[in-house]
């Protein structure tokens, strides 16, 4: 019978023995805490401020930041609100930075959330640039959110996100 | 043989921040397009580009098929001496090319 064992245990218990002895409960708590800690994300991921632009454990973001926090701000991404065609859309990205030896932008990364290749481009500039601004023309596979992440010389990351409406997507034409 | 056009100011004052622009003739094939016979055109995009100003790298980019055909890039750099801007790039077929432009710095 399937319940035999359980009944047997219940019968063998004396009235005062309903509770598990205290020492073993603390042991279990410690074990659960240890398991929880082992499963949890690294503390620096949890500790970082909420940034709606980027998901810190997104592998692409992680490959750029190695888990360091990405704060919103300092980056400006200029795109038209609406593009008739996604084949060629003017894009300008700039970062508020004095661009000196001590404090400059090291890299600017562009991510197109709905393109088949999300990692659109990375631009590496430096104190020589004088001005942290890069422009290009990009392809967009439909309406989506574009994210720009700037890596500064002090090791901090900053980001912005822009939503763009694209009427005719690139990448989908038959010809 | 790729063709490229570089736009620089004709001359710049020493210390002036100048805009450098380049357009390269390249299809930046996405790998999703098909030709008239229906066969897939393989992906071929410029994936790396660098610009040296008198031998010192002032700009580098890693690009993807998310950059429009005939890639256009513009960036800034500080003019410190007369000299040459040398661009180098390479595509997925490992075809490399270069383009050069000179800048005259006054003052």
Image: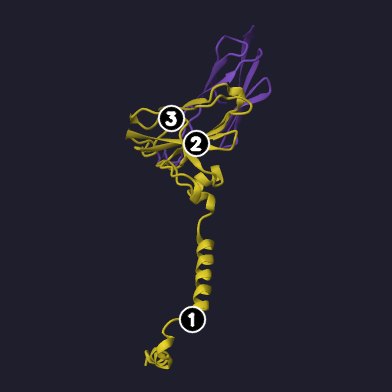
Chain colours: A yellow, B purple
Q: Position of residue B100 (x, y in %)?
A: 61, 19
Which residue of the protein is positioned furthest toward the top in this rendering?
A: B107
User: Which residue is found at the position 63% from the left and 10% from the top?
Assistant: B105
> How much space separates mark 1 and mark 2, taking CA atoms?
52 Å
Task: Say left or right for B4 vs A171.
Answer: right
Viewer-side residue, A130 vs A36: A36
Chain that bears disc 2: A
Which residue of the protein is positioned furthest toward the right in this rendering?
A: B55
Q: Position of residue B95 (x, y in %)?
A: 60, 33
Residue A21 disc label = 1
Q: Nearer the viewer, mark 1 or mark 3?
A: 1
Badge 1 element: loop
Marks 3 and 2 close (CB-CB < 8 Å): no
Q: Position of residue B6 (x, y in %)?
A: 55, 18
Chain that bears disc 1: A
Q: Is residue B65 visible?
A: no
Badge 3 element: strand
Q: Which residue is mark 3?
A: A77
> How much space separates mark 3 and mark 2, taking CA atoms?
12 Å
Position of the C terminus of chain A by quadrant: top left
Q: Which residue is mark 2?
A: A158
């Amino acid at each position: 019978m399937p319940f035999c064992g359980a009944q047997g245990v219940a019968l063998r218990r004396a009235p005062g023995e309903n509770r598990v002895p205290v020492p073993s409960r603390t042991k279990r708590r410690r074990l659960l805490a240890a398991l929880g800690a082992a499963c949890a994300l690294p503390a620096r991921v949890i500790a970082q401020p909420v940034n709606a632009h980027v998901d810190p454990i997104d592998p692409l973001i992680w490959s750029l930041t190695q888990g360091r926090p990405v704060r919103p701000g300092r980056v400006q991404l200029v795109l038209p609100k609406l593009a008739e065609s996604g084949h060629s859309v003017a894009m300008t990205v700039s970062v508020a930075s004095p661009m000196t030896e001590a404090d400059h932008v090291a890299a600017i990364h562009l991510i197109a959330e709905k393109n088949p290749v999300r990692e659109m481009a990375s631009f590496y500039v430096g104190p020589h640039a004088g001005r942290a601004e890069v422009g290009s023309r990009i392809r967009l596979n439909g309406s989506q959110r574009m994210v720009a992440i700037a890596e500064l010389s002090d090791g901090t990351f900053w980001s912005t996100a822009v939503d763009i409406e694209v009427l005719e997507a690139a990448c989908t034409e038959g010809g | 043989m790729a063709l490229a056009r570089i736009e620089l100011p004709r001359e710049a004052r020493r210390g002036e921040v100048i805009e450098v622009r380049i357009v390269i003739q390249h299809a930046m094939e996405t790998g999703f397009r098909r030709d008239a016979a229906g066969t897939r055109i393989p992906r071929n995009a410029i994936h790396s580009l660098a610009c040296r100003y008198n031998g010192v790298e002032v700009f580098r980019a890693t690009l993807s098929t998310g950059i429009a055909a005939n890639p256009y890039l513009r960036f800034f750099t500080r003019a410190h001496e007369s000299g040459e801007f040398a661009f180098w790039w390479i595509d997925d077929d490992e075809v490399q090319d270069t383009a050069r432009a000179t800048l005259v710095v006054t003052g």
